[in-house]
Amino acid sequence: MLQASREEDRSYTKIADAIRTYGYPPTQDLRQLWRRLVLNLLITNVDDHLQNHGCLHVEHGLWRLVPAFDINPFPDKERESKSWLSEKDGPITDVHMLLARAAYFSLGQKQAQTVMAEVYVAVVNRRKVALDTEVGLCPYELDDFAAAFEHGQMEATAALLYG
């Protein structure tokens, strides 16, 4: 949708602009994109380059975001997105900058906080899900990735949401 080569960088606001122009329905996909930004920050997925955001053609030049893919925690990386939030904002480094731009992704502050709370709770509960017999990870396997999930932005999110 952005007509960008693999080497070119684009910001999330540029992706949002393309969704507004070509998306079907755009509001739902804009909100989903913002949810993914929150998740990426909270799990330290810093491999969020343009090719990790796909779209499928729906009809007559209209597109939808594909389900999220290639989302990986990086415990040993600096908590800074590869793709910038906007040219003005730079890389995503904290939850406050995401909230400040929520309206650009068709979310009011209350809606954005609700989405952020849902993502936060999912990340907090990751150990329980991962250790469940359906997933079957061992505690020591989770310990290797703890730094990707347990960091200052999780604390900042909790403070922002729950005071």
Image (cartoon, helix red, strand yellow):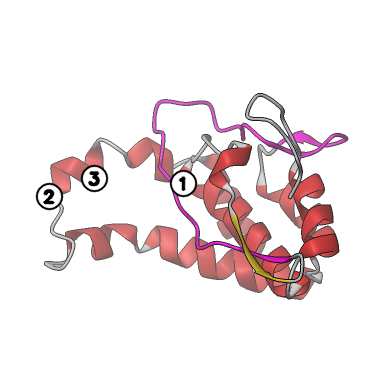
Task: Name the foreground residue: 1 vs 69.
Answer: 1
Secondary structure mainly formed by the magenta segment: loop
Q: Residues within 10 Å of mark 3 (few under 14, many from 20)?
A: some
Which residue lies under the disc numbered 1? 43
Q: Residue at x 85, y 34 (%)?
A: 87
Q: Residue type at mark 2?
A: Cys
Residue 45 sits above or below residue 120 on the image: above
Residue 60: image location, x then y, percent: 76, 71
- Name the disc covering residue 138, or none: 2
Residue 35 sits above or below residue 41 on the image: below
Q: Residues within 10 Å of mark 1 (few under 14, many from 20)?
A: many
User: Does the magenta-highlighted stretch encompass residue 77?
Assistant: yes
Residue 6: image location, x then y, percent: 63, 29
* Labels 3 and 2 touching (C-beta < 8 A): yes
Q: Residue type at mark 3?
A: Leu
Give how far apart the Cα atoms at labels 2 and 1 are.
19 Å
Residue 4: image location, x then y, percent: 73, 35
Write the start and end of the magenta stretch as one range: 62-91
Residue 22: image location, x then y, percent: 79, 63
